[in-house]
Amino acid sequence: MKQIKPVLLIISLLIIVSFLVPTLLVLPFSSEKVSGKLDEQIQKPKTKEPTVEVAVYRTKTKQIEKPDLENYVVGVVASEMPASFEKEALKAQALTARTYIVKQLMYGGNSSVPKGAVVEDTQNFQVYQNMDELKKEWGNKYNRNIKKIRKAVEETAGQILTYNGSPITAAFFSTSNGFTENSEDYWGNPVPYLKSVKSPWDKTSPKFSYKEAIPVSVFENKLNVQLSNTGSIGTVTSRTHGNRVGTITIDGKKFTGRDIRDRLGLRSSDFDWVRKGDNIIITTKGYGHGIGMSQYGANGMAKEGKNYQDIVKYYYKGIKITSTNQFLNKVTARK
């Protein structure tokens, strides 16, 4: 029995220690407050947009300028939309500008563009000004304006608008008459994402309504019509989905609203007129063709708290915001 006691003692001690050790390990941690922790913030590698230059024919200098794509977009946004607009509206404009030029780079430009250029710097393409020109235009507001626009462009970098996997025709204009226009009602060709939508924000635009006088002789000459001294000066025979003049008959001749706008140089194809003496007094609503995104409408949406995704998806139906990489890789591969 004397030999058994040490063995029992050792076993007893081992059992006590086996219960005590976990307690000793836990107690220091449970008695202290947590003052820090291990964080995890794994950054995903950014996909870099391929470097692409845009060959712009400068119509004043007759030279070709080659800004990189993002600087080109900055120059377009600064030239096409007031810098005073909300940042989300500027971001929406950046998407339209980038989408336009990516499509031009992919599919080729207009045959009228001088050799070596992709686009010109006029409204027939997209209005573009470089930084020196913007400094002259803005003066002491340059630093503030360009910082705001660059920020808007940077926050949409690498993004364009697509429909069924292809860059869209990202049409835009200044001010609607309260509605945008179906593409087929103005251009003749239906485009699924360019459909008429309400745009009530435009009513606050300084360009919403405009009145001008055209001499009767000029009116008759440009339309090749003869007006009587009294009575009707034409009859509107149809309206478009965007409530603009669809067709009109004057002196027995039929015109579209676009015909009248183009021939008389009107701001919009939503017009009305009266004769006063030797003048035709014409009132127009809206400014521009009316297709796609209204710039003043976009600014109105932004003021109400809508972001740029909301804006572009409202004015372009069924589109997606897509990375430029797959498209620009094709462009660079051809070089």
Image (spheres, rainbow, N blue to C red):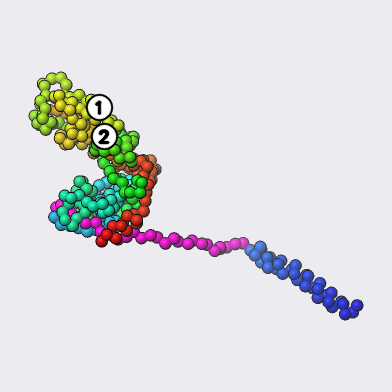
The residue at the far right in this view is 1
Q: Is residue 45 magenta?
A: yes
The local crowd at label 1, few if under 14, some if 14 to 19, many if 20 or more residues have their Cα within 10 Å, is: some
Residue 30 screen position, x and y as percent: 66, 62
Circles 2 and 1, Cβ within 8 Å, touching? The answer is no
- Magenta-drawn segment: 33-61
Q: Is residue 232 left or right of residue 21?
A: left
Decide if residue 327 is in sight here. yes
Amino acid identity at mark 2: Asp
The local crowd at label 2, few if under 14, some if 14 to 19, many if 20 or more residues have their Cα within 10 Å, is: many
Magenta segment's dominant SS is loop
Q: State whether residue 225 is above or below residue 112.
A: above
Q: Is residue 103 left or right of residue 226?
A: right
Residue 74 screen position, x and y as percent: 28, 53
The one nearer the camera, 58 or 327, is 327
Residue 15 screen position, x and y as percent: 78, 70
Quadrant of res 49: bottom left
The residue at the far top in this view is 231
Q: Which circle's residue, 2 or 1, is located before the other in the chain?
A: 2
Residue assigned mark 2: 185
User: Which secondary structure lies at badge 2?
Assistant: helix
Residue assigned mark 1: 238
Quarter placement of the C terminus: bottom left
The one nearer the camera, 296 or 110, is 110
Q: Residue at x 14, y 31 (%)?
A: 213
User: Which secondary structure lies at badge 1?
Assistant: strand
Q: Is residue 215 magenta?
A: no
Q: Residue at x 68, y 68 (%)?
A: 25
Q: Residue at x 18, y 26 (%)?
A: 249
Amino acid identity at mark 1: Ser
